[in-house]
Image (cartoon, rainbow, N blue to C red):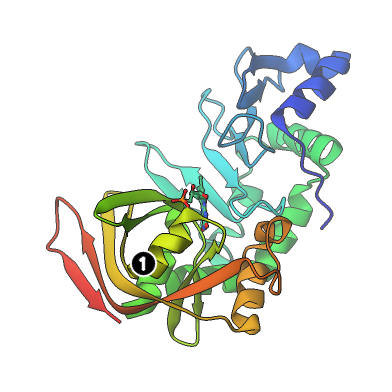
Amino acid sequence: MEVKRVSIREAKKRIKNDPELSKMLVRSGWREIALDLDGDGMADVSFSSDSVGRKIDTIAIDLSGNGEFNLYLHDFDGNGIPDTVCMVQDGGEEEIVAFGGEVELGFVNLGVRTANLLVAEDFMNRELGLSLADLAAYLKMHAAVMLAELEKRENAEGIEKVYYFLDDAKTYYLATTDGTKPRVRPFGTILLRDGKLYIQTGKSKDVSRQIKGNPFVEICTFMNGTWLRIAAELVEDDSKDVKTAMLDKMPTLKAMYSADDDNMQMFWLKDATATFSSFTAEPEVITF
Ligand SMILES: Cc1cc2nc3c(=O)[nH]c(=O)nc-3n(C[C@H](O)[C@H](O)[C@H](O)COP(=O)(O)O)c2cc1C
């Protein structure tokens, strides 16, 4: 499926240049554009991004006709194809639509507001190159893979659980010591390979020098009411295939590093103690 993703800014420009679409514009912000497709004064479809200036990653559609968005298509990994489809049910509960059998992709068969949906589809097709039929075919094809992946993440244990949490949280904070002083900074690189959890940095950075001086570090991150703290010793792994695996997993790193640039540095966490904590449950400690 070909998908052209545009930024909110570009989409706004296109809408403003199109007399028909500009009449439908009911909201236009830094991170969101909302359109009234059927002329009843209420927004039927909204395009948004999670931060200012980014490409559209969420499309919300009002299928119920009550003026509230109840279908959300999210594209988390930025490939232009929605990764999750959420329905907000009566009472505000958000649910991932069960793909397949019972609901036949949920939104496709809902039929509640077919006309709206078709106009929304037409818009998505024209402006974003996205059609619901393509989307349905894609989801059907990948539903099993997606559900298996979700299940894997939910049931993960041990080092895998720690890895998925860090991966989903996207950002964690790495604390090192500089002589007697603590230092902390945001990090995001994470790789699970051959049973080891790796992070990545550049030899030119202070953080690298500090790890050399004292390899005992702590990592902390927080997501959905749970925080994770890991104490470990960092051990350098200079092998090219680990670096290549890291670059393949997070291709944006390729703009700054390469496997043989003599700067890229990989560390794995040795003798790690990872503690998941929350205000509502007993801490869970995982060592690896
Ligand atoms: C969200 C986010 C993720 C980051 N991830 C990394 C990373 O994985 N590795 C890295 O070396 N720098 C990463 N950085 C950049 C470092 O935080 C930055 O270079 C920092 O200054 C390094 O610490 P230092 O100044 O003590 O060397 C990230 C920055 C942000 C904002």
Which residue sits furthest bottom? 194
Say which amino acid is labelled 1. Answer: Gly
Residue 216, x across and y down, in percent:
30, 69
Residue 54 visible in this rendered orientation of the protein: yes
In the image, residue 132 above or below residue 58:
below
Residue 223 visible in this rendered orientation of the protein: no
Residue 197, x across and y down, in percent:
43, 76
Using residue 5 as the reference point, say whether residue 205 is left or right of it. Answer: left
Using residue 228 as the reference point, say whether residue 173 is left or right of it. Answer: right
For label 1, the crowd category at 10 Å Cα-Cα, with few meaning under 14, some 14 to 19 and many 20 or more, is: few
Task: Please give the name of the residue rendered at 70% of the width and 69% of the height, measured from the top-left corner.
Answer: 261
Residue 51, x across and y down, in percent:
57, 34
Dot 1: what SS? helix
* Residue toward you, 282 or 133: 282
* Quarter assignment of residue 230: bottom left
Residue 105, x across and y down, in percent:
61, 57
Using residue 223 as the reference point, say whether residue 107 is left or right of it. Answer: right
- Quadrant where the N terminus lies? bottom right
* Quarter assignment of residue 88: top left
* Residue toward you, 79 or 43: 79
* Residue toward you, 137 or 237: 237
The residue to which callout 1 is attached is 213
In the image, residue 282 above or below residue 44:
below
Task: Please give the name of the residue rendered at 60% of the width and 27% of the height, measured from the top-left corner.
Answer: 31
In the image, residue 81 above or below residue 66:
below
- Quadrant where the C terminus lies? bottom left
* Quarter assignment of residue 152: bottom left
In the image, residue 235 above or below residue 15:
below
Count of numbered tags: 1
